[in-house]
C-alpha cells in the first residue's frame, strides 16, 4: 500500500509512505525493509519482524536506498514498549535510537549488528573471535522495561534561536527543546541547563565528573554574542569556546575536571575525551588488563591514549623495569596525560598522529599494545605497522563495530588472530556499543 502524499520537489520521495515488513537490524539504529518495487528502506523507530507504515525522510527516485521513520505500527514486536522519553519518536530528538525497545532486546540488536559487521567486513564468525554473542550491560544498568538508566555524564545541548536548550533532531540541525534528558546522569541534570535561557549561545556542554564533585559547562557562543552570566543550580566551572581560535578558555573555576578509574585520579581538560558512562572507564580497563595479562618488565604501547587511562593501568602493572609509550594527537590531552602519569619515570607520552609518530620512535618490537582509535578506526597502514612489532597480545578498544571489523581483517592479514571479544552496552537507548578485542599471533592459536 502506498499512501497518498505530495512530493515536495521533482524526484524527491520525502513524505511518501509505504506499508512494509521490517527485516533485520542494521548498523546505525535502524532496520531494513523494502518497498514493493524492491527499493531499500532504512527505517527508524521500528523493530525486526514488525509491519509498519514507513514515511520517507530522505531520498529520491532511483536512489540506492531511502531513509524513513515508522509512523504507524500495524503489527508490533513482542520486544516493543512505549518509549519512556516524551521527546523520542519520528521527527523528534535524535539522541536515542531504541527507546521503544526492551533493554534486553536493545542488547540483542547490538549483538546482531556486531556479528553482521564481523561477518561482512572481516569474514569472521562470533565463534572464531571467541565471543558468545552477548552484549553485557554496565553495572547498575540492568533495569526493567520502561526504566531508563541515567548514564550520560557529558551532554551536548544545542540552543535554538530563542535561547532554549535542547537536543538535535536525527540527521538535522534543528533543535528539539527539552525540559529533561532521561539518559543524562544525575550530576548533569542537577545543573539545570534546560531550565534557563541561553541567548546568543550555539551550544552548551554539561559535564558531571565521575568520582569527584567537579561540574563544568562549556559555552559556544554564536559569532559576536556576549557570554551570559551563568547561575546554575550548583557550583560549576565555566569555560567558553573561542570564536576565532576554536580553543576552550577558562571563564570561572578549574579548567579541568577530575575523573576516577582503576584506583587513580585523572585530570581531564575542558572538552577533553573521557568515557561518557560512569562505569565505562573501569569496565574497559578491567577487560583490557584481563585480556593482556601484563607482566613485570613488559614494554607496552598505548595508542590514541587520551589523558592516559590505559597507560596508567599498564604502568601500574609492568612495574619499574617495564616501560610504556603513549601517543596522542591532542595537545591538551597530552599535557593532561603527562600530568596524570608524572609519578611513572618509565612512561613517555608523545604528541602527534599515531601513523606519523610511531615510525619515528624507532621501536621494532614490543610486548603489549593497547589501541583505542577514533570512530573511523586505525586503518590498514597503522595495523600493518603494529602487526610487525611482534606483540605478545594486542587489545583493541572500539566504539564502532564496522571500523573494528575492518581493522581485525587487516590484523588477520598481518598474522594475528582474535583470541576473544567482549561487548559492553555502555550507551543504553542508543545504537552505540563498545567492544574489546584481544589479539595474539596466529601461530599461538594453532
Image (tube, rainbow, N blue to C red):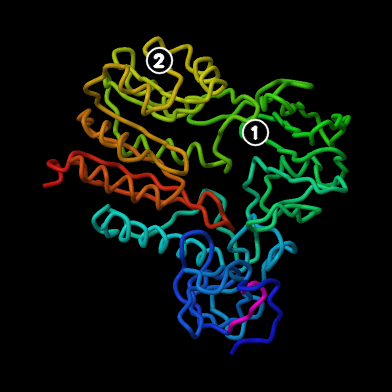
- Position of 124 with respect to 135 (left or right) is left
Q: Where is residue 181? Give x, y as percent.
A: 72, 52
The residue beneath circle 2 is: 348
Principal secondary structure, stretch drawn in magenta: loop
Q: Where is residue 301? Give x, y as percent.
A: 34, 25
The structure residue drawn at horizontal position 27% and vertical position 48%, both measured from the top left corner, is: 409
Mark 1 or mark 2: which is in front?
2
Q: Where is residue 160? Give x, y as percent.
A: 81, 48
The structure residue drawn at horizontal position 78% and vertical position 22%, both measured from the top left corner, is: 251
| Residue 209, numbered label | 1
Outermost residue on the front side: it is 10
Camera-side residue: 391 or 4?
Answer: 4
| Residue 384, numbered label | none
Say which label, 1 or 2, has the lower sequence index.
1
* Magenta-highlighted residues: 13-18
Q: Where is residue 289? Give x, y as percent.
A: 36, 34
Amino acid at each position: 500500500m502506498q499512501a497518498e502524499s505530495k512530493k515536495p520537489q521533482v524526484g524527491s520521495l520525502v513524505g511518501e509512505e509505504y506499508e512494509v515488513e521490517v527485516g533485520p537490524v542494521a548498523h546505525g539504529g535502524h532496520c531494513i525493509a523494502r518497498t514493493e518495487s524492491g527499493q531499500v528502506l532504512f527505517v527508524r523507530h521500528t523493530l525486526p519482524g514488525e509491519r509498519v507504515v514507513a514515511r520517507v525522510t530522505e531520498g529520491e527516485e532511483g536512489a540506492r536506498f531511502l531513509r524513513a521513520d515508522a509512523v504507524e505500527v500495524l503489527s508490533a514486536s513482542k520486544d516493543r514498549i512505549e518509549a519512556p522519553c516524551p521527546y523520542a519518536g519520528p521527527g523528534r530528538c535524535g539522541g536515542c535510537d531504541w527507546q521503544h525497545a526492551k533493554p534486553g532486546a536493545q542488547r540483542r540488536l547490538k549483538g546482531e549488528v556486531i556479528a553482521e559487521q564481523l561477518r561482512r567486513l572481516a569474514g569472521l564468525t562470533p565463534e572464531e573471535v571467541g565471543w558468545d554473542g552477548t552484549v553485557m550491560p554496565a553495572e547498575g544498568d540492568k533495569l526493567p522495561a520502561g526504566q531508563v538508566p541515567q548514564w550520560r555524564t557529558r551532554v551536548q545541548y544545542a540552543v535554538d534561536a530563542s535561547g532554549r536548550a535542547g537536543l538535535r533532531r536525527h540527521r538535522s540541525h534543528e533543535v528539539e527543546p527539552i525540559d529533561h534528558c532521561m539518559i543524562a546522569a544525575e550530576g548533569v541534570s542537577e545543573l539545570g541547563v534546560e531550565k534557563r535561557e541561553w541567548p546568543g549561545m550555539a551550544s552548551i556542554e554539561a559535564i558531571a565528573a565521575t568520582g569527584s564533585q567537579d561540574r563544568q559547562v562549556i559555552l559556544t557562543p554564536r559569532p559576536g554574542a556576549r557570554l551570559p552570566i551563568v547561575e546554575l543550580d550548583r557550583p560549576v566551572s565555566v569555560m567558553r569556546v573561542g570564536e576565532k581560535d576554536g580553543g576552550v578558555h577558562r571563564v570561572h573555576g578549574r579548567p579541568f575536571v577530575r575523573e576516577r578509574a582503576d584506583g587513580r585520579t585523572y585530570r581531564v581538560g575542558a572538552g577533553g575525551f573521557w568515557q561518557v558512562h560512569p562505569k565505562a572507564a573501569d569496565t574497559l580497563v578491567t577487560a583490557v588488563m584481563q585480556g593482556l595479562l601484563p607482566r613485570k618488565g613488559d614494554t607496552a604501547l598505548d595508542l590514541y591514549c587520551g589523558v592516559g587511562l590505559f597507560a596508567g593501568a599498564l604502568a601500574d602493572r609492568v612495574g619499574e623495569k617495564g616501560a610504556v609509550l603513549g601517543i596522542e594527537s591532542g595537545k591538551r590531552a597530552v599535557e593532561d596525560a603527562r600530568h596524570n602519569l608524572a609519578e611513572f619515570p618509565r612512561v613517555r607520552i608523545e604528541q602527534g598522529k599515531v601513523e606519523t609518530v610511531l615510525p619515528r620512535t624507532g621501536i621494532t618490537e614490543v610486548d603489549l599494545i593497547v589501541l583505542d582509535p577514533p570512530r573511523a578506526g586505525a586503518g590498514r597502514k597503522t595495523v600493518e605497522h603494529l602487526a610487525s612489532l611482534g606483540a605478545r597480545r594486542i587489545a583493541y578498544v572500539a566504539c564502532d563495530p564496522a571500523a573494528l571489523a575492518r581493522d581485525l581483517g587487516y590484523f588477520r592479514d598481518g598474522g594475528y588472530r582474535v583470541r576473544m571479544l567482549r561487548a559492553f552496552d555502555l550507551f543504553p537507548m542508543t545504537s552505540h556499543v563498545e567492544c574489546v578485542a584481544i589479539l595474539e599471533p596466529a601461530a599461538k592459536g594453532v
